[in-house]
Amino acid sequence: MDEEFFERVYAQVRRVPAGSVCTYGTIAELAGYPKASREVGLAMSRVQRGWNLPCHRIVNAKGTLAPTYAFGGQRVQRQLLEDEGVAFVDDETIDMARHRWPPCDEPGGPEQLALPLG
DNA sequence: CCAATGACCAAAA
DNA sequence: GTTTTGGCCATTG
């Protein structure tokens, strides 16, 4: 299996700072697989405790929390995010406009954050 | 190899 | 607004 793919995904997930969130598609893009957003989710499903992966900061493009989440429920995820300072516009929807990462205001753009292939 | 699945995304009806 | 369709790419049986 392409462990490299997973490692890249995890590497990007770890880059997401506390208080911010990121979408599967963005993670995939940064990881070097612009269209492999689904695999990011798949990678998340494979993640487990002890990996130090802030998977709770990864949400879908709408900012809504995943139903089949692993932590124990969306409620837990929301608690984690709120504890980090993430604002929710709904019980299960994040204010993406404020917490989306990477920011588009940085010089050079988010492309600078992407890992070079190879 | 083929078929089906998936914490997705975007566009169309 | 919801529901369908097409696409992407890796995993699993």
Image (cartoon, coloured by chain):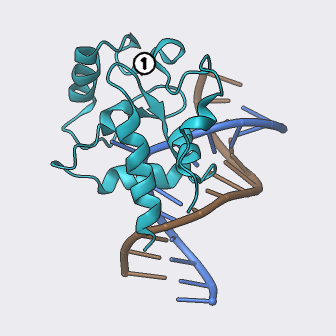
Chain colours: A cyan, B blue, C brown
Disc 1 residue type (three-letter)? Ile
Relative to the observer, which residue lies in front, A64 or A32? Answer: A32
A25 to the left or right of A99:
right
State the quadrant of the C terminus of chain A: bottom right
> Quadrant of residue A97 in the image?
top right
Q: Position of residue A44 (x, y in %)?
A: 35, 49
Q: Residues within 10 Å of mark 1 (few under 14, many from 20)?
A: many
> Quadrant of residue A86 in the image?
top left
Q: Residue at x 63, y 51 (%)?
A: A35
Q: Position of residue A41 (x, y in %)?
A: 43, 49
Subunit under mark 1: A
Q: Residue at x 23, y 34 (%)?
A: A73
Q: Residue at x 58, y 58 (%)?
A: A117
Q: Position of residue A67 (x, y in %)?
A: 35, 37
Q: Position of residue A48 (x, y in %)?
A: 21, 52
Look at mark 1 in the image and give the residue it sits on: A94
Q: Residue at x 39, y 32 (%)?
A: A16
Q: Secondary structure at mark 1?
A: strand
A28 to the left or right of A9:
right
